[in-house]
Amino acid sequence: MARQLEEQIVGRFPVGRRLRVLDVGMGRGAQALRLARAGHQVTGVEQDPALIAAAREELAGEPEGIRERMRIVQGDGRDTGVHFLPGSFDVVLCHGVLMRVEEPDALLAGLARMLAPGGMLSLLVRNGDAAAMRPGLAGDWAGTLAGFGAASYGLKWLTATLAGIGAPLHTWYGVRVFTDTVPDDACLPDDLETLLAVEDRAARTDPYRGVAALLHLCGVRG
């Protein structure tokens, strides 16, 4: 997914431009730090004190120039209007957060307000259209039946929502098409580069991307 995000940033903004990036629900800060290393000014928002501590510890080991480009704010992603002015960011990331909030429409509308004209909103969400795939492949038949009715975060809903908040869908990818059932602690395969190439190809290709575990969507504010 990092490759896809970089691809969209490079394709959308002039080369060498230092972007103002907001990462809502940054977790341990891996993506935020990656963007700071690339030269962008990054603000990470996170609610969990343990994750903030881990992010600060990782940041402390970076050179001074990178440390100066990254700011960490403890707070709720739904309160961006409290911390920042509208139109303050060129890129807003919200990865793995949407599924955990009770009012996703309000969260998304708040994030869209943070975008400057032409700014990009990057979302990573669990694919509701394929919620039955993972339990089905694992032989969990009860979970599979339950998954058939869990399409609340499907592509159609997300596309309509992005249009409604003024950041229409620009492009989308599938994430973890073939690898979602692989255990998190599994050893890396010898042919890792081939595996990554397969996932990258599937991420862009119908019908495979439509049954991915996650959807990566990029909306652009007009």
Image: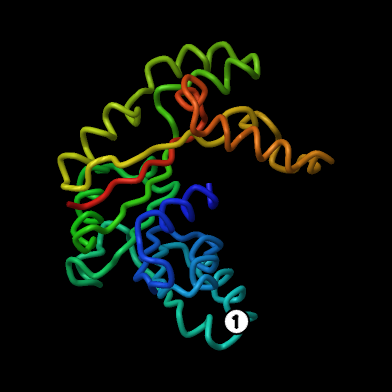
Indicate the position of residue 8 as horizontal and vertical percent values.
Answer: 42, 51
| Residue 198 in the figure: left or right of residue 18 | right
Q: Residue furthest front?
A: 15
Indicate the position of residue 47 as horizontal and vertical percent values.
Answer: 41, 63
Q: Is residue 155 above or below residue 221?
A: above
Indicate the position of residue 6 as horizontal and vertical percent values.
Answer: 48, 55
Between 32 and 16, the one lying in front of the other is 16
Indicate the position of residue 78 as horizontal and vertical percent values.
Answer: 27, 57
Between 17 and 202, the one lying in front of the other is 17
Q: Which residue lies furthest to the right in this view?
A: 190
Location of residue 79 by image quarter: bottom left
Total numbered badges shown on the rendered structure: 1
Residue drawn at 43 percent across, 41 percent down: 216
| Residue 191 in the figure: left or right of residue 92 | right
Location of residue 177 by image quarter: top right
Q: How is the image coloured?
A: rainbow
The amino acid beneath tag 1 is Ala
Residue drawn at 23 percent across, 58 percent down: 118
Residue drawn at 37 percent across, 59 percent down: 24
Q: Which residue is label 1 attached to?
A: 60
Between 170 and 32, the one lying in front of the other is 170
Q: In this view, does 109 lie above or below 67?
A: above
Residue drawn at 73 percent across, 37 percent down: 194
Q: In this view, does 147 lie above or below 171?
A: above
Element type at mark 1: helix
10 Å crowding of disc 1: few (<14), some (14-19), many (20+):
few
